[in-house]
Amino acid sequence: MKEKDLPEFARIAMKAQHRAARKLRAEHKRLGMPLISWKDGKVVEIQP
């Protein structure tokens, strides 16, 4: 489903989620901590 087809509350929620993820990545990079994520069905650490 394209963003323009979503209801307004869903677009607002998506923007908030993207903003939170961007802040989280920046904080982890600043602290030198790895991000924990899923990749190919496995948990992986992504180094800053």
Image (cartoon, rainbow, N blue to C red):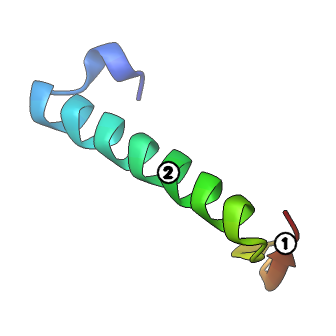
Direction from residue 34 to residue 22 in the image, left or right: left
- Number of callouts: 2
Residue 6 image offset from top left, x and y in percent: 24, 26
Quadrant of residue 40 within the rendered picture: bottom right
Residue 26 image offset from top left, x and y in percent: 62, 52
- 2 vs 37, nearest the viewer: 37
* Badge nearest the viewer, 2 or 1: 2
Residue 2 image offset from top left, x and y in percent: 42, 22
Residue holding disc 1: 40
| Placement of the C terminus among the 4 image quadrants | bottom right
Residue holding disc 2: 23
Residue 13 image offset from top left, x and y in percent: 23, 43
Residue at left offset 41%, top offset 29%: 1
Residue at left offset 83%, top offset 81%: 44
Question: Does dot 2 land on a helix, a strand or a loop?
Answer: helix
Q: Callout 2: few (<14), some (14-19), or many (20+) C-alpha neighbours within 10 Å?
A: few
Residue at left offset 78%, top offset 72%: 32
Q: Callout 1: few (<14), some (14-19), or many (20+) C-alpha neighbours within 10 Å?
A: few
- 7 vs 29, nearest the viewer: 29
Residue type for callout 2:
Lys
